Image: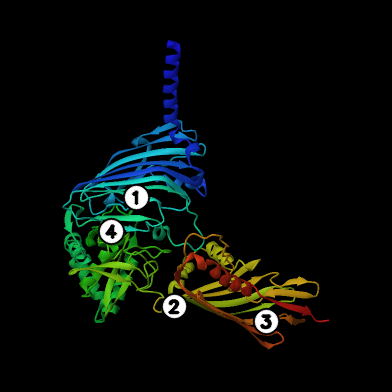
């Protein structure tokens, strides 16, 4: 009986130990969470303790099972720190697919580097600790834990239980504690349709629990994940930033505080520099023309260096330091330009926003908090503003390469103002082309084309500074419909005054006309075919978005080979719908000369998932007609 009793106790103890070790076994992950997943968040818990206006602690625990190489980015074991933010503890433990521990990682095993792009000494207190783990085999699980403390209570991280595609979530927890007198606030978006429970919501506590989020596939034309996944923004009316107390319930109050407390004292420059600016503008009295001169000076003199978001603080470098060193981040260069403009009596305002080349992310107008990842300059021009991207050495004056059509915060001495930046409407984003091509009796194509781009399509002006090999690669991808393509000549005209970019190209290609017996077949549209495949998606989950509208118009002269007669020509075609307009026309001048005309107008917009098939069919008709062919027959 004693042997049996102790055997049972031993068996139970062993089972408990094995069960503990098996907690991170991949066999415990539900099948529904493995589908479409590169990684599974087994647990992510963030505890935010706001002790006072000047003291906040973050405790993070994250258990991530990485299923393949693409899932490595889901680990995100990264901590930024500086003189006001410290990393109290950071560690990780690695388990194999069975849940057995294989490695323990302490802080010394993490990389600790400068958070600046070039390690500039002026920003030496801004650093990042991160884990760069190379797995031996997949799957594996990492348990990452980090404790941080900061006096910057202006930044409270948002809670996003699902923050990328192809990652599933077993459980995500947020716990926030805070004093009742600091004006804690939250803004919930996209909670509907997800398993999220608010477990606490009192004057001093907030808790959310999210469970069982299957991995979301990124469907073609999907909106940015930040626009469709659940998110809770968090903030305080009474906060501290870089050692400076703030209190702001409205954007006007916030802008007034930021102007008075953060920007004050950063705009001093030498009398010599002031005199130089006045000499540059000379007798010019027009504020816009003076701003052009100063902007050009900044572009020639300074260069941009990157500081990781959230590290450099929101107080810019002194303008005198930028003037001396010739570089700075977006805050510093914007503030420097503002200082130089002030020297020639041109008013301007620092502007906070989200800068992104693909997504139009907005400052939330109805939630006053520290938002944004970028800074630019606003110059009042009547009832509107001229927007200057001060980090660029080649953007035209007033052109918005990645800051258009979004809400931003303009910081004025009298307070903050939420404004929408310039909108490059659909037809402004144009590419107008005129060209020609000739087909030889052997099917060889030779031709030339001039393409003039404006609006958001002007962005391609960076082509003129590309190395020759990269230019060639660009055009071979752009004209992927032309096999054996040769770029014989490429010249560019970048008109910064009109913000228009012209590409002049001469090309050739063997076998563009396909010979078969006594017939030759060739696509009439050589220069601007829509070749993308809009995939068929059954049971589409997300809405779809045409992120930028555009208008392309082409007129191409086509010279057919001698010794051939026209057997068949594509018919004229016209298509009008909710998503845009498309039209082709083929004019026969004589037996050997044609004029091909084409226009395609796409409307920017966010559309419901049920309309995706209509959009796919619209683009399918465009693609099919873009590939319409001329059939020639050899004269007998």
**Residue 599 visible within the image:** no
Q: Distance between the residues labelled 2 and 4?
A: 39 Å
| Quarter of the figure with the C terminus | bottom right
Q: Which mark is residue 559?
A: 3
Observer-nearest of 369 and 389: 369
Percent position (x, y) of residue 537?
56, 61
Under tag 4, what secondary structure? Answer: helix
Percent position (x, y) of residue 290?
27, 77
Q: Distance between the residues labelled 1 and 4?
A: 52 Å
303 relative to 219 in the view: left or right: left
Under tag 2, what secondary structure? Answer: helix
| Quarter of the figure with the N terminus | top left
In this view, the mark in front (2 or 3): 2
Observer-nearest of 16 and 153: 16
Q: Distance between the residues labelled 2 and 1?
A: 45 Å
Sequence-wise, which precedes: disc 2 or disc 1? Answer: 1
Task: Give the vertical position of 356 relative to 68 (above or below).
Answer: below
How would you rate the neighbour count of disc 2 (Cα within 10 Å): few for under 14, some for 14-19, many for 20 or more? some
How would you rate the neighbour count of disc 4 (Cα within 10 Å): few for under 14, some for 14-19, many for 20 or more? few
Q: Which mark is residue 428?
A: 2
Work out which residue is located at the far bottom of the displayed protein and give it.
589
Q: Distance between the residues labelled 2 and 3?
A: 31 Å
Q: Quadrant of residue 508?
A: bottom right
């Amino acid at each position: 009986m004693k042997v049996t009793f102790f055997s049972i106790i031993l068996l139970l103890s062993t089972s408990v130990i094995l069960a503990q070790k098996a907690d991170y076994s991949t066999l415990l992950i539900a099948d529904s969470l493995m589908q479409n997943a590169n990684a599974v968040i087994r647990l992510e818990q963030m505890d935010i303790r706001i002790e006072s206006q000047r003291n906040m602690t973050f405790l993070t625990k994250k258990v991530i099972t990485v299923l393949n190489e693409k899932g490595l980015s889901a680990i995100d074991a990264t901590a930024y720190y500086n003189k006001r933010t410290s990393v109290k503890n950071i560690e990780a433990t690695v388990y194999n697919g069975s849940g057995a521990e294989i490695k323990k990682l302490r802080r010394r095993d993490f990389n600790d580097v400068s958070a600046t792009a070039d390690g500039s000494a002026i920003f030496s207190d801004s650093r990042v600790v991160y884990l760069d783990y190379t797995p031996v085999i997949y799957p594996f699980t990492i348990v990452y834990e980090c404790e941080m403390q900061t006096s910057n209570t202006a930044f409270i991280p948002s809670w996003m239980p699902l923050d990328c595609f192809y990652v599933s979530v077993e459980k995500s927890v947020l716990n926030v504690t805070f004093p009742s007198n600091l004006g804690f606030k939250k803004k919930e978006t996209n909670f509907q349709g997800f398993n999220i429970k608010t477990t606490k919501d009192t004057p001093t506590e907030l808790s959310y629990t999210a469970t069982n989020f299957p991995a979301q596939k990124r469907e073609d034309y999907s909106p940015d994940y930040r626009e469709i996944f659940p998110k809770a923004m968090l903030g305080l009316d009474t906060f501290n930033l870089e050692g400076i107390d703030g209190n702001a319930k409205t954007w006007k109050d916030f802008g007034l505080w930021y102007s008075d407390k953060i920007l004050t004292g950063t705009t001093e420059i030498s009398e010599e520099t002031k005199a130089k600016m006045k000499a540059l503008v000379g007798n010019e009295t027009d504020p816009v023309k003076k701003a052009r001169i100063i902007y050009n000076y900044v572009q020639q003199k300074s260069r941009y260096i990157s500081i990781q978001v959230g590290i450099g603080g929101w107080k810019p470098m002194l303008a005198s330091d930028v003037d001396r060193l010739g570089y700075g981040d977006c805050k510093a260069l914007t503030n420097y330009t503002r200082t130089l403009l002030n020297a020639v009596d041109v008013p301007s305002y620092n502007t906070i926003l989200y800068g992104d080349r693909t997504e139009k992310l907005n400052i939330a107008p109805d939630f006053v908090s520290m938002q944004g990842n970028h800074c630019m300059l606003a110059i009042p021009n009547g009832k509107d503003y001229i927007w200057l991207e001060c980090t660029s050495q080649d953007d035209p004056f007033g052109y918005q390469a990645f800051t258009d059509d979004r809400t931003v915060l303009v910081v004025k001495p009298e307070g903050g103002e939420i404004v929408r930046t310039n909108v490059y409407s659909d037809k402004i984003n144009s590419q107008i082309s005129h060209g020609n091509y000739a087909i030889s009796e052997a099917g060889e194509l030779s031709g030339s084309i001039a393409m003039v781009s404006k609006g958001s399509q002007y962005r391609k002006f960076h082509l003129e500074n590309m190395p020759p090999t990269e230019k060639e690669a660009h055009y071979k991808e752009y004209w992927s419909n032309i096999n054996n393509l040769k770029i014989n000549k490429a010249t560019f005209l970048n008109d910064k005054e009109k913000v228009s970019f012209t590409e002049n190209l001469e090309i050739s290609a063997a076998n563009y006309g396909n010979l078969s017996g006594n017939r030759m077949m060739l696509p009439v549209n050589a220069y601007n075919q829509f070749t993308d495949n809009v995939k068929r998606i059954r049971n589409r989950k997300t809405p779809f978005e045409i992120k930028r509208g555009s208008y392309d118009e082409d007129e191409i002269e086509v010279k057919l080979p001698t010794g051939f007669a026209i057997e068949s020509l594509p018919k004229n075609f016209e298509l009008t719908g909710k998503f845009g307009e498309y039209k082709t026309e083929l004019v026969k001048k004589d037996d050997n000369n044609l004029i091909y005309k084409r226009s395609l107008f796409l409307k920017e917009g966010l559309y419901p998932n049920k309309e995706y098939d209509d959009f796919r069919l619209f683009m399918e008709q465009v693609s099919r007609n873009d590939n319409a062919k001329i059939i020639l027959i050899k004269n007998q």
